[in-house]
Image: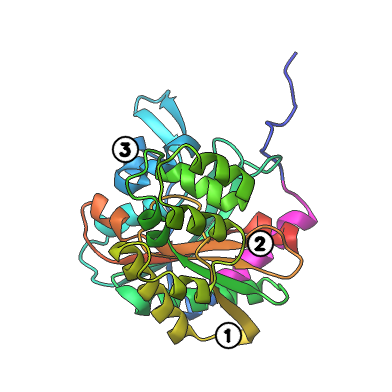
Amino acid sequence: MPTHKPVIGLNDAFGAQARALRRLQADILKLFDEAGYEEVIPPILERPDSMQSGAGRFLADQTVVFSDPAGAGTLAIRSDMTPQIARIAATRLQHEEILKLCYSGTVMLARPDVRGGSRQQWQTGVECLGVAGRDGDIEVMHLAARTMLVAGFDQPVLQVGHIGLLKALVAGSDTPLETWTAKISHRSPDDLSELIATEQLSDTVSSALLEMVSGIADQQWIRAHIGLINADFDHAANELLSLIKELGEELEGHVSVYADAAVMPRFLYHSGILFAGFASGVAQALLHGGRYDAMMAAHGRDMPATGFSCDLWALINAC
């Protein structure tokens, strides 16, 4: 007998839930359009080497791969749309010096982000390509702030970090960077202490890592650690502090902005500034973003790039 049980982590949507998603999608895409971002609709399938090339290799364990019965070889279901935008920018739109693109569509994860979560997401976001440094980062962060307001969240917050801080702290470690980011993301000093005990880190670095997960790695903490770690840490810290100074303490609609060295990326293709959006009464991040220049270089076009994305289902469920 055939089974009609749904696949765990994959769900149907109909009625009020489907209408809610389409309304939110329309409102956010209108916001992006008014900001000058043109929509692109990539296919849901890609060749694995396109999805996982260069910095995109960090998506490998979240990508479902299968053999195409029509003879196209091995194909992958996209787990993130940013690598697809990078491919389009490096090929189909390679003659455009500046690209401001937006998208909204389904992605599928090999496993859920959190225990009991969904493997399917309706990823929606923007990519600003060709605008270097703070100008691109600030433009995208303003748009991220407005996205949380359009979605109806109270007291939204943008927490801003820099992946260079962690890279500098764990330089020379035998533990992969993705393991460190996972431990930092859990914000558990006990778990992190177990990892630190396996490494030969200085007392200064060990203390700094534990302070990051203890919730005190704010702007003052970052400034106090300049000159204590190494030159790479100082470079990332100064870049982050300069950005925070230019952003100020608040964006439009009373969206607060905080520096937090413990902000970690969802995927490790980011190469600079990172940020995550939160709101009152919501435990999980509403959106993630940051700079990912290295991915563009891996796709054969060396150009600056920054962006952010959110999952519409997560926004709807959090409201």
Task: For the residues labelled 2 and 3, say whether their Cβ atoms are less than 8 Å apart.
Answer: no
Q: Position of residue 170 (x, y in %)?
A: 39, 50
Q: What residue type is labelled 3?
A: Asp
Q: Main secondary structure of the magenta part?
A: helix
Question: How far apart, in angstroms, are the residues tagged by discs 1 and 2?
Answer: 30 Å
For mark 2, does the 10 Å Cα neighbourhood hold few (<14), some (14 to 19), or many (20 or more) residues? few
Mark sitting on residue 22: 2
Which region is colored magenta?
13-30
Q: In which quarter of the image is residue 305?
A: bottom left
- Measuring 23% from the left and 71% from the top, which residue is drawn there? 97
Q: What residue type is labelled 2?
A: Arg
Task: For the residues labelled 1 and 3, say whether their Cβ atoms are less than 8 Å apart.
Answer: no
Quadrant in the picture for the N terminus? top right
Circle nearer the viewer, 1 or 2: 1
Closer-to-camera residue (197/15)? 197
Q: Is residue 262 above or below residue 237?
A: above
Q: Is residue 6 above or below residue 121?
A: above
- Measuring 41% from the left and 73% from the top, which residue is drawn there? 240
Q: In which quarter of the image is residue 282?
A: bottom right
For mark 1, does the 10 Å Cα neighbourhood hold few (<14), some (14 to 19), or many (20 or more) residues? some
Q: State yes or no: residue 73 in magenta.
A: no
Mark sitting on residue 49: 3
The mark nearer the N terminus, 2 or 3, is 2
The type of colouring in the image is rainbow
Circle nearer the viewer, 1 or 3: 1
Farthest residue, direction top: 1
Q: State yes or no: residue 24 in magenta.
A: yes
